[in-house]
Amino acid sequence: MKLPFWLRPVLFIAVLLAVWQVAIDRHPGQLLPAPTGVALGILDLIRHGLLLKYVVASLFRVTWGFGLAALTAIPLGLMLGWYRRGEMAFYPLVQVFRPISPLAWIPIAILWFGVGDLAAIFLIFVGCFFPLLLTAMSAVHNIPAVYINAGRNFGLSSSAFVSRVLYPAVVPQLLTGLRITLGIAWLVVVAAEMIAVSSGLGFLIVDARNAGNRYDLVVAGMVMIGVIGLLLDLVMRSLERVRSFHWSTSEG
C-alpha cells in the first residue's frame, strides 16, 4: 500500500525519535536529554507561560526586521536593476558590505541601540537587506527583453509599465528571495537573542544552559526554533503557489 505523501516525513521523524529514545535509555549518563524529557520541558515552559512569551518576542523582532528590509531593499533593488548607471555606482559598495556577517554588527548594534529589541531588529535588518537587494536587482535583469519591448511598443506610461510588466515579471523571483531571506532572518534573531536581548527563543537556550544546565529546555528551544522555521517556510511556499504570482512563468 502506497503511503500518503504527508505521512512519509511523519514516519521518518517518528523513527528518529524512537532511535533517539532507545539510545538515551541505553546510555542514561549522557547530557543529551531523551525526547520524553524534551517534551516535558516544553510542557513546563507552557505551564509557566514562557513558551508563548518567547515565541511572540522572536516573531515580533523577525517581523519588524524582515519587513523593514523588504520595504527598503526591494524598491531600491528594482530601481538599481533598472537604471544601470545607478547600479554601477552602488554595486561596489554593496559588495563591500554584503559579506560582513550580521553577527559582526552586534557590538555596533548594542552601542547604537543598547540591549533590547531595537538591537535585534537592526541585526535582522542588516542580515536581510543585502540578499533582498541583490534578489530584486537580479529579478529585473532576468526580465525577458520581449516583455520590455512589448510594453514600450504599446506606449505604456511609466506607472502602467511598472504595474503591467515590471511587477508581474519580477514577483516569482522576489517570492523565492523572500522565502530564503526569511530563513536568514530566523537564524539571525536566534543568534542576536543569545547576546543582545533578554527574551526570545535564543535567550531561552542560553538562559537554560546557565541556569543549572537545563539541557531539556535547551533542546526544547532548539525544537521550537526548528518547528517555527518550518511553519514560516511553509507559509512562504504557499505564496509561491498562488497562480496570480506566476505571470512570468507562463511563457511558452
Image: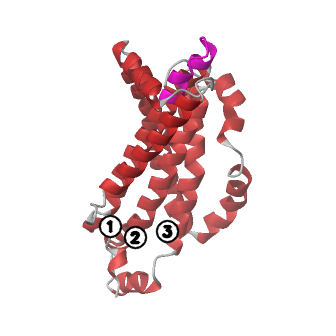
Magenta residues span: 207-220
Residue 211 pos. (x, y %): 59, 11
Q: Quadrant of the N terminus?
A: bottom left
Q: For the residue marked with disc 3, what is the amino acid?
A: Ala
Q: Amino acid at mark 1?
A: Ser
Question: Which tag is nearer the camera, tag 3 or tag 2?
Answer: 3
Magenta stretch, main secondary structure class? helix
| Sequence-first tag of 1 and 3 | 3
Query: On screen, 36 above or below 234?
Result: above
The amino acid marked with disc number 2 is Leu
Q: Position of residue 169 (x, y in %)?
A: 39, 72
Q: Please, is residue 117 above or below residue 10 in the view?
A: above
Q: Are marks 2 and 1 in contact (CB under 8 Å)?
A: yes
Q: Is there any visible trace of residue 180 in the rendered image?
A: yes
Looking at the image, residue 89 sits to the left or right of residue 9; the answer is right
Q: Residues within 10 Å of mark 2 (few under 14, many from 20)?
A: many
Residue 188: percent from left, percent from top = 57, 38
Report helix, strand or loop for mark 3: helix
| Residue 216 among those drawn in magenta | yes
**Label whose residue precedes the other's in the sequence (3 or 2):** 3
Q: Residue at 56%, 48% (x, y): give it.
A: 129
Q: Residue 78 magenta-drawn?
A: no
Question: Can residue 115 be seen here?
Answer: no
CA gap between label 2 and label 1 equals: 6 Å
Which colour scheme appears in the figure? Answer: secondary structure
Residue marked by disc 1? 163
Which residue is drawn at the image coordinates 36% and 15% (left, top)? Answer: 49
Please state if 52 lies on the left or on the right of 218 as rendered: left
Above or below: residue 23 compared with residue 246: above
At 42% from the left and 40% from the top, the residue drawn is: 227
Which residue is under mark 3? 139
The residue tagged 2 is 166
